């Protein structure tokens, strides 16, 4: 789909039938695999498939990126989480950064179908990391693209674009923000000033995804919520992003260890291959 | 055997269940309690008085013919012993290990009135282990393709038991499990040093061999709804056994610091996801130098002993005293022997962070025991001015759990009580929705494997009666008679 970003179409008829925008699936690559929560970006009930889009950032997602068409995942569970509450708000500004675009695409489909006017603001590090662009443009009244390096659209951040639009005293009825935590936090800080209700979709650490472990707890409006069953959508103005950011780093050392292990395995493989040639 | 030796056997003291030495077992996840060998089993079987009207059998929630199977052991008819056990209990290898026999069959044992009761649990385990070593399972029957379909939701002890009984009655049974492996709490909750995975796998295999189909990765209420199962997929009855999977937190400040786990999360990472074998298994777990476990039930003991095995010093803090601990005495003893420390009369007030979002310590308060509360246990009363800190870089909260509301919330026809449990007829497990039955922790608060299994057996029988009453006219499928066992 883009460098480091992969789209999988997975056969899962029951999930395809029931999934709604905002919901996610948990996948496991193999018997040793983690349970990885991923947004359901598309559903194709007639074909009995769903599409998941992921970025190869951790061990499991890198392993997934190496799979071939026709391979099987060990497990796919879903649809999980509460569907986004889709209503006719009027003018809806959709702010998505990076992989957040995968989450935003079905939201835009849903909100457009409900008769909303969509204003899309899509950002990525560079042009090649943008995806679903044509699909989103086709559904939007207005779309703005920006990149960190200026390789496509405007040079800057999605929040820069949003600030400009808001300062031009454009009127919006609703905002949806999806993407990396700092981006959502900055977006929410901005929309708070304009009293613009803002929905965010959170992706904390999860294990089971069914409300059983509480790893995904987040503080929303002073209350503890489980993102897997109470979310993943929440009122962005109420989310404690700083706490969430700290909780997401709980296993950073273990992720590093995995990365080191991979590097060591690769070196070992190269050494063995080299030895065989000699 | 002469009468004299028989009498001597009966007067012998209870045969202790051998355990691996604490120092050895605290370093790995291998099984702690070793089973009886043949001599031990025979000696212990002799202690049974073979009462004409046994008091142990009513003490067993699934009604095993206890004197019958013990007699078979005594006479070395082990195949018969297996058959007698399995006539009432589909999961003897599991129950022989995790049942609290001391409050059930063994508590009622007549021998126990004068001396120590017969070690019924250890004998059950011996028979199950004998079967494992000597008998290979075969697919016992393919279900009749015209038989009514029954759905079982949840593959824990209740779900597996109901599924096995329903399959024996001749129904086509599908068990839906939300996780990727069957077993429910037996898989994600109980550690392998108490219940080895091969024992669990084998007993699940046994249930499958009765013709039960198990579908993993299906969260009923999300992947498929109850009405869809009943109207579109043709299930004529449903048994809900979704357990008590919702962890409680304390709702004190600092609880969301990194390093603070619910016991469910901690145990699921280890037991289900095999995080203790990270990075071979990809799910990480972080255990610090000093782990504090909050709570006093079996789950707290399991979490504490797991953290110990992952290399941490472990202290359990409990707001009452050792005498009030709800955990099985045997598990408390095992934990303390292995080096887990117990701090009695301590109430946690707040988790303190290290400034980077990770837990560093718990601020606590001392308590004393006051008047008995509704549960009959003496209430912990905080002592003012007794605040202190306990260092902890890992905290595991094991205070309680309640039913997961996920499925129940999707179906307005299912009525619940205030505590979130389903309203059921206690005799039959019938819920307020027609054709839907429930048992185990989703319906009752007994909280033990065997109580869930007892519920499941009663419900399976009630489901058979319901389906027979309903007859073939509703579905066109053949009426199922009281199908012969085996």
Image: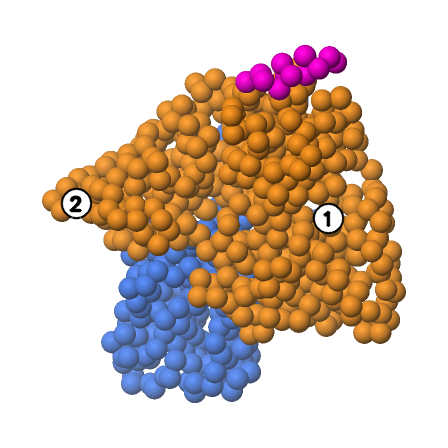
Which chain comes out orange in the rendered image?
B
Q: Mark 2 points at which residue?
A: B383
| Residues at discs 2 and 1 both on one chain | yes
Sequence-earlier tag: 2 or 1: 1
Considering every residue shown, the one lying at the far left of the view is B385
| Element assignment for label 2 | loop
Percent x, y of residue B451: 57, 48
For disc 1, the chain is B
Which residues fall within the magenta stretch? B1-13
Q: Residue B164 carries which label?
A: 1
Image quadrant holding the C terminus of chain B, namely top right
Q: Do the residues labelled 2 and 1 touch (CB within 8 Å)?
A: no
Spatial CA distance of label 2 from label 1 is 52 Å
Residue at left offset 74%, top offset 36%: B84
Instruction: Give the colour scheme of this rendering.
Output: by chain
Percent x, y of residue B204: 69, 42
| Element assignment for label 1 | helix
Most foreground residue, B41 or B159: B41
Most foreground residue, A261 or A277: A261
Colour displayed for chain A in the image of the structure: blue
Above or below: residue B88 compared with residue A147:
above
How many marks on residues? Answer: 2
Image quadrant holding the N terminus of chain B, namely top right
Image position of B167 (left or right of A168): right
Residue at left offset 83%, top offset 56%: B482
Most foreground residue, B384 or B283: B384
Residue at left offset 45%, top offset 20%: B22
Percent x, y of residue B361: 24, 40
Q: How crowded is mark 2: few (under 14 residues within 10 Å), some or many (20 or more)?
A: some
The stretch drawn in magenta includes residue B11: yes
């Amino acid at each position: 789909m883009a460098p480091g970003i992969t789209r999988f179409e997975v056969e899962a008829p029951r999930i395809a039938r029931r999934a709604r925008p905002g919901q996610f699936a948990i996948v496991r690559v193999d018997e040793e695999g983690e349970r990885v929560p991923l947004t359901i970006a598309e559903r194709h009930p007639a074909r009995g498939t769903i599409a998941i889009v992921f970025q190869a950032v951790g061990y499991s997602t890198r392993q997934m990126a190496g799979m071939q068409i026709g391979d099987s995942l060990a497990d796919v569970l879903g649809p999980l989480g509460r569907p986004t509450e889709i209503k006719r708000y009027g003018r809806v500004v959709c702010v998505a950064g990076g992989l957040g675009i995968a989450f935003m695409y079905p939201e835009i489909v849903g909100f457009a179908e409900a008769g909303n006017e969509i204003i899309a603001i899509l950002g990525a590090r560079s042009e090649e990391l943008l995806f679903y662009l044509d699909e989103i443009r086709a559904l939007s009244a207005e779309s703005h693209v920006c990149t960190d390096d200026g390789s496509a659209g405007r040079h800057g951040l999605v929040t820069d674009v949003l600030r400009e639009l808001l300062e031009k005293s454009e009127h919006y009825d609703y905002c949806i923000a999806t993407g990396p935590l700092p981006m959502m936090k900055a977006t929410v800080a901005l929309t708070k000033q304009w009293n613009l209700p803002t929905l965010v979709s959170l992706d904390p650490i999860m294990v089971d995804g069914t409300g059983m472990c509480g790893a995904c707890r987040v503080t929303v409006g002073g209350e503890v919520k489980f993102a897997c069953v109470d979310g993943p959508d929440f009122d962005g103005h109420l989310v404690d992003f700083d706490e969430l950011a700290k909780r997401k780093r709980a296993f950073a050392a273990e992720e590093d260890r995995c990365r080191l292990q991979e590097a060591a395995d690769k070196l070992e493989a190269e050494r063995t291959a080299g030895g065989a040639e000699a | 055997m002469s009468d004299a030796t028989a009498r001597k056997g009966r007067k012998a003291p209870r045969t202790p269940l051998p355990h691996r030495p604490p120092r050895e077992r605290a370093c790995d996840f291998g099984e702690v309690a070793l089973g009886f060998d043949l001599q031990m089993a025979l000696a212990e079987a002799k202690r049974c008085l073979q009462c004409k009207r046994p008091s142990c059998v009513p003490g067993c929630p699934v009604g095993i013919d206890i004197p019958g199977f013990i007699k078979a052991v005594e006479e070395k008819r082990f195949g018969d012993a297996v058959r007698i056990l399995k006539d009432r209990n589909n999961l003897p290898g599991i129950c022989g290990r995790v049942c609290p026999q001391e409050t059930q069959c063994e508590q009622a044992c007549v021998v126990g009135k004068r001396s120590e009761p017969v070690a019924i649990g250890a004998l059950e385990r011996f028979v199950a282990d004998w079967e494992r070593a000597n008998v290979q399972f075969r697919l016992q029957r393919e279900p009749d393709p015209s038989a009514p379909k029954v759905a079982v939701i949840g593959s824990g002890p209740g779900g597996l038991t109901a599924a096995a009984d329903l399959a024996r009655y001749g129904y086509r049974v599908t068990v839906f499990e939300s996780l990727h492996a069957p077993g429910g709490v037996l898989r994600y909750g109980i550690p392998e040093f108490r219940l080895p995975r091969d024992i669990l796998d084998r007993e699940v295999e046994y249930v499958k061999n009765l013709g039960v189909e198990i579908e993993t990765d299906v969260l009923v209420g999300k992947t498929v709804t109850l009405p869809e199962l009943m109207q579109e997929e043709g299930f004529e009855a449903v048994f809900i056994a979704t357990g008590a999977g919702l962890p409680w937190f304390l709702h004190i400040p600092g609880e969301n610091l990194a390093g603070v786990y619910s016991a469910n999360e901690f145990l699921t990472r280890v037991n289900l996801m095999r995080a203790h074998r990270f990075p071979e298994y990809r799910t990480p777990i972080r255990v610090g130098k000093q782990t504090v476990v909050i709570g006093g039930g079996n789950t707290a003991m399991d979490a504490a002993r797991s953290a110990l095995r992952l290399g941490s010093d472990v202290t359990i803090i409990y707001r009452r005293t050792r005498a009030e601990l709800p955990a099985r005495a045997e598990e408390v003893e095992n934990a303390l022997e292995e080096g887990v420390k117990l701090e009695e009369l301590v109430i946690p007030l707040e988790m303190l962070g290290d400034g980077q979002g990770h837990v560093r310590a718990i601020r606590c308060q001392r308590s004393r025991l006051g008047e008995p509360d509704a549960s009959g246990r003496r209430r912990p009363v905080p002592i003012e001015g007794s605040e202190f800190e306990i260092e902890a870089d890992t905290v595991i909260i094991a205070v309680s759990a309640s039913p997961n509301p996920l499925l129940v919330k999707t179906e307005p026809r299912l009525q619940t009580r205030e505590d979130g449990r389903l309203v059921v007829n206690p005799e039959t497990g019938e819920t307020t929705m027609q054709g839907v039955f429930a048992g185990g922790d989703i319906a009752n608060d007994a909280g033990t494997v065997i109580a869930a299994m007892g519920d499941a057996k009663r419900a399976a029988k009630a489901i058979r009666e319901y389906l027979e009453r309903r007859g073939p006219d509703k579905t066109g499928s053949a009426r199922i008679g009281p199908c012969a066992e085996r």
